[in-house]
Amino acid sequence: MESDKLDSRKMAILNAIIRNYLETGEPVGSRTISKFTDLSLSSATIRNEMADLEELGYLVQPHTSAGRIPSDKGYRLYVDKMMEEKVEEVNNMKEVLDQKADRIENLLKKVAKLLAVNTNYASMITTPKYRSRKLKFIQLTNVDDEHLLAIIFLEGNIPKNKVIDADHRYEESVLLKLNIVLNSLLQDLDLEEINMSIIQKIKEQAGEDSALIGRVLDAIGEAIREEDNIEVYTSGATNILNYPELSGDDSAKKLLYTLEDKQELAELVDDRLLSETGEHTGSKGDIQVYIGNETPIDSMKNCSVVTATYEIEDGVYGKVGIIGPKRMDYDKVVGTLKTLMTQLDEIFKKK
Amino acid sequence: MESDKLDSRKMAILNAIIRNYLETGEPVGSRTISKFTDLSLSSATIRNEMADLEELGYLVQPHTSAGRIPSDKGYRLYVDKMMEEKVEEVNNMKEVLDQKADRIENLLKKVAKLLAVNTNYASMITTPKYRSRKLKFIQLTNVDDEHLLAIIFLEGNIPKNKVIDADHRYEESVLLKLNIVLNSLLQDLDLEEINMSIIQKIKEQAGEDSALIGRVLDAIGEAIREEDNIEVYTSGATNILNYPELSGDDSAKKLLYTLEDKQELAELVDDRLLSETGEHTGSKGDIQVYIGNETPIDSMKNCSVVTATYEIEDGVYGKVGIIGPKRMDYDKVVGTLKTLMTQLDEIFKKK
DNA sequence: GTTAGCACTCTATTTGTTCGAGTGCTAACA
DNA sequence: TGTTAGCACTCGAACAAATAGAGTGCTAAC
């Protein structure tokens, strides 16, 4: 165990084993490797090397007389190596994405589906996370005798509608006045900045209609908080069932549940986690690979998760992820995500 | 085979068999019934009756020396019978539903989840289908130098926002004029009623700003069409993995896929289908039961589906459904759906 | 350092056997 | 005539034993 560094032959063998295992999903034996690789070595020699690799922790033997399968550590090495050599691929997802995606949600759903279909794994994508939204402007309008509509425009051109209960019908002129008051005092403020002092000032200026102001402010708060809410869309969850090593016991059920529930998925996006585990991914660009136990989500301990960060505008980003078996085609997945990133970039820039 | 009508003893036996099978999921034999029921008959007699029931098509024998399980026809009889006797139950879902559900989507999602959790089956719910939405009113507002915001209010108090490209900034007074023109001419019209004649009239009155009108009309069309889109929410899809008879082969995969994809689910809601198959459900109220092959969806041929129709306002309705194994607890499911219906009614009425 | 050969291990698969639940039929009974 | 006891029979589930084969580790020879 002189050094953890592998000589090139061990490297080649490990590589061959992993590649083979990715394809077949079966433990791979010495004979197979002896034939498959161009370095012409007998199975016996391979066996010796495999024993070494196992001792070093890169391989695992499910049971005594079975072949070897890669350990998490083995995958990790493979992935890191692969990332270094990775060349940009060009797929043609663009056409699909280019179709008018009226709302960002629809675009995201489409992206998730696209990824799932392309890779045959499960995929997830989150709505982008804004820091704290500022209010751009607000406008009150009559709906009927009992309701007002507040159109709340947030930073980033996000319109929100809120219906507000009213005790009576307001004159247009009154609404006009209120609109002016609200906008002049609240413009470009976020939730933190709207404090009691400002609220008092508004109520003062609103005069007899100050009762309404509280409800309007509630609506604003709700709108901002709503927009801060991160949603997660998933697709291709059922693809999981195509991989026997995942669908065997009831871990598949748990995994599917996680994907359906989405609650937990948000964790993958948590900033803390990103920086915490980010260190030991040898990733280039924005791509992160979590192998087996590296994922923060329990039900995914048998899986690998590859995530990428997309940026919709400066400082506003979301996460895309692909969830599959540990023996996923990392090469393809990383490639797909990379091209997706560039294409999303183009789409968002164009907007 | 004199008559398809069953005497009361056969009825009781069939009933006992089905009840037992609902619980255990195992084929039930003559001995079991002989003990379970109060009509004290020997297993031999039961056997004779069972043979009859099988000949009549109400029971099925998986293999020669196994007990019997209900056929689709058997279930159908059971369900119809049950529906007649059904008494209203009162669950307490209301608390959950009463929590402020700001948007209808959120309410629907909550309902789906509630049903899934309560019944342990999968559930689905569609957004309500409006005939054709009428425009209630529209208002144009400046956003910035290049964009206008159109707030489009549809019948049923649905606000929609559309951002419209503008070549320049419009004066407030101009917008005011446009708003008045648009509203006076378009109010209470649906897509069909907005014809060329009206469009011409608007453009005429808009004068030099008529270029904008086209884009505004597009936005209106889009908004209406968007709202016509029926969405389907599902929940508890993974629950079906709890039932071995469904999760065995890869039919589970297909079923899960159907639930995830949702495309096909819309079929369940199709009016044509409702009236077509509706005839042979002996249902009271709005509840429909599809047993096995009665469902229009292929991947559900091994399942039963119970659907109900909820009405959000006059003539505007959506569908809720529960998908489970054929041996689902029809009693409970129907009860749950019924109370859900009354509680939704209350919620919508209150609004 | 590499390889051939061999004994050994362990699993997956097959085959055979048994067990029991359940049936259908017949004959006896009320 | 309807009900029941009894019996032979069927068939799948469960268990055990046998088999095959893939793979290993080790030793000895090259």
Image: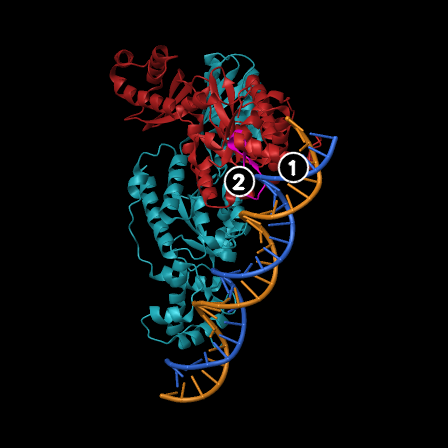
Chain colours: A cyan, B red, C blue, D orange
Tell me which amino acid carries mark 1.
Ala
Quarter of the figure with the C terminus of chain B: top right
Q: Position of residue C22 (x, y in %)?
A: 61, 42
Question: Which residue position holds label 1?
Answer: B44
Task: Look at the numbered discs 1 and 2 and tell me whether their residues touch, using CB distance below 8 Å.
Answer: no
Q: Nearer the viewer, residue B21 or A326?
A: B21
Q: Which residues are magenta?
A: B57-73
Residue that appears at 59% across and 19% down: B346
Q: Nearer the viewer, residue A151 or A287?
A: A287
Residue A55, numbered label: none
Decide if residue B29 is in sight here.
Answer: no
> Which SS class for mark 2?
helix
Q: Is residue A133 above or below residue B334?
A: below
**Parent chain of label 2:** B
Prevalent SS, magenta region? loop
User: Of callouts 1 and 2, which one flags the residue occurring earlier in the amino acid sequence?
Assistant: 1
Question: Which residue position holds label 2?
Answer: B240
Verify whether residue B150 appears in magenta: no
Q: Nearer the viewer, residue D4 or B331?
A: D4
